[in-house]
Amino acid sequence: MTSQSQGIHQLLQTEKRAKDKLEEAKKRKVKRLRQAKEEAMAETNQYRIQRDEEFRQKQAKIMGSQSNVLEEIELQTLGKIKELNASYSKSMESVINELLSIVCDVKPEIHVNYRITN
């Protein structure tokens, strides 16, 4: 009977050691998964920082050229405004005189389509 209880006791101890090994393996697996996740997050953050820097450089390059274009357009617009103001002041007097002569010097005439009916 003692050999039987000794065998059962030995079997229980072996089962406990196997269970402990499984738990330890699970802990190592969880630890390795956490480590892999942290490494992936660090790699992702590094890649994101690199891409952001590339984007900022491209944006600065494009925006710099756009500011030059904006300045050029602004200068062209101001030149056109000055040109239009000069044309206005030069033509204003003659246009007003022509309009006044058309409005004030009315020549009464009968329209060609008018029919006299008696």
Image (cartoon, rainbow, N blue to C red):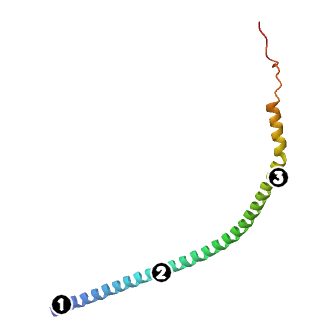
Res 79 label: none
Residue type, numbered disc 1: Ser
Instruction: Please tell me how many numbered marks the rendered image carries.
Output: 3
Which quadrant holds residue 95?
Answer: top right
Q: Residue at x 80, y 36 (%)?
A: 99
* Relative image position of residue 77 (x, y in whole percent): 76, 57
Q: Nearer the viewer, mark 2 or mark 1?
A: 2
Calculate the distance from the C-alpha at mark 1 to the C-alpha at mark 3.
118 Å
Q: Earlier in the sequence, mark 3 or mark 2?
A: 2
Q: Earlier in the sequence, mark 1 or mark 3?
A: 1
* Relative image position of residue 78 (x, y in whole percent): 77, 58
Res 38 label: 2
Q: Nearer the viewer, mark 1 or mark 3?
A: 3
Element carrying mark 3: helix
Image quarter where the C terminus lies is top right
Please state if 29 lies on the left or on the right of 113 as rendered.
Answer: left
For disc 3, the marked residue is 86
Q: Nearer the viewer, residue 8 or 115?
A: 115
Judge the density around disc 2: few (<14), some (14-19), many (≥20) Cα neighbours within 10 Å: few
Q: Residue at x 52, y 80 (%)?
A: 42
CB-based contact (under 8 Å), mark 2 and mark 1:
no
For disc 1, the marked residue is 5
Element carrying mark 2: helix
Q: Residue furthest top?
A: 118
CB-based contact (under 8 Å), mark 3 and mark 2:
no
Q: Nearer the viewer, residue 9 or 85?
A: 85
Q: Residue at x 71, y 65 (%)?
A: 66
* Relative image position of residue 7 (x, y in whole percent): 22, 90
Residue type, numbered disc 2: Glu
* Relative image position of residue 39 (x, y in whole percent): 50, 81
Please state if 44 lies on the left or on the right of 65 as rendered.
Answer: left
